[in-house]
Amino acid sequence: MSAEKKLIVTQVKSAIGTKPKHRGTLRALGLGKIGSKNEFADRPEIRGMVARVSHLVEVSEEV
């Protein structure tokens, strides 16, 4: 049984002035303020959400 990869998503830029869909995606990822972090399983749905707001977040991978 292999360990599932994890993604740690950190918000690094403000959502002020961004499109409503981007703000909604940040909310769905559990991010709201600069510096907030959340951990997710590495799944295609999460990768897609991160791709939509890639200019506002940083992603690091853990095994």
Image: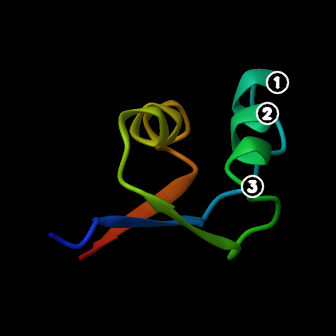
| Secondary structure beneath label 2 | helix
Q: Residue 56 appears at what percent x and percent y?
A: 58, 50
1 and 2 marks in contact (CB < 8 Å): yes
Amino acid residing under circle 1: Pro
Q: Which mark is residue 14?
A: 3
- Is disc 2 surrounded by few (<14), some (14 to 19) or many (20+) residues within 10 Å? some
Q: Name the residue under label 1.
A: 20
| Secondary structure beneath label 3 | loop
Q: Is 50 above or below relative to 8? A: above
User: Horizontally, is 34 left or right of 32 in the view?
Assistant: left
Q: Residue 37 appears at what percent x and percent y?
A: 63, 73
Q: Which is nearer the N-term, disc 3 or disc 1?
A: 3
3 and 1 marks in contact (CB < 8 Å): no
Q: Quadrant of residue 6?
A: bottom left
Q: In which quarter of the image is residue 62?
A: bottom left
* Quadrant assignment for the N terminus: bottom left
| Secondary structure beneath label 1 | helix
Looking at the picture, tell me which residue is in the foreground, 31 or 57. 31
- Is disc 1 surrounded by few (<14), some (14 to 19) or many (20+) residues within 10 Å? few
Nearer to us of marks 3 and 2 is 2
